[in-house]
Image (cartoon, rainbow, N blue to C red):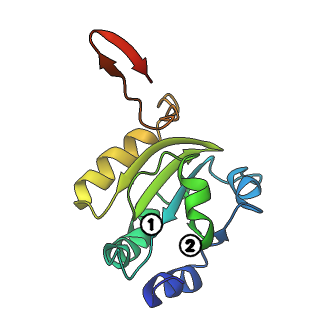
Amino acid sequence: MPSHLVRALSERQHLPVVDETNIDAFLVPAAGEADNTLLFFTGDPAQRPEADDVAVVLPEILQAFQGRLRGAVVRRSVEDKLKARFNVAVMPSLVVTRRDQPVGVLGKIRDWSEYMQKIGAWLAPDAPIMVPSGGPKVAITHAGKEIAR
């Protein structure tokens, strides 16, 4: 369940709540809408109180990039299912996408200038998309021979 502040954010700012059933439709812009989105992965508010701080900043970010960025809150119950797809490693996180591809991720609360600088760069049409991490890769060697990967 989202915190009171996150729930109010979605209601007052009219941000859609997306899950695995509607996220693909949300990521495709309607005529005249921005190609880029800002997805808010909140995490468990009991364990991640920073989510409320990000919820306060999110409308300001959307205002600063008005017309260039559409926002949505990811439904808590599906965050674990969608984290890998959008390269989310920590909660809370804001993910900038270009259509259905992640362009950048900002975890936890950040300084305002960092939001402006990084998101501004990720909105550039030539900004590279992120490559999925594929999870941790560890090589174990024993007596000079690789035995697991």
Report the disc number at residue 63: 1
Q: Is 145 in front, or is 28?
A: 145
Q: In the rendered view, tell whether residue 149 sits above or below residue 38.
A: above
Q: Name the residue carrying label 2.
A: 76
Task: Give coordinates of residue 4: x percent, y percent.
Answer: 46, 90
In the image, is 48 to the left or to the right of 16? Answer: left
Image quarter of the N terminus: bottom right
What type is the residue that disc 1 sits on?
Gln
Q: In the rendered view, tell whether residue 106 sits above or below residue 108.
A: above
What type is the residue that disc 2 sits on?
Arg
Q: In the rendered view, tell whether residue 58 sits above or below residue 106.
A: below
State which tag comes first along the sequence, 2 or 1. Answer: 1
Q: Residue at x 23, y 55 (%)?
A: 113
Structural crowding at the residue carrying mark 2, measured as other residues with C-alpha within 10 Å and reported as few (<14), some (14–19) or many (≥20): some
Q: Is 66 in front, or is 50?
A: 50
**Residue farthest front in this picture:** 143
In the image, is 147 to the left or to the right of 110? Answer: right
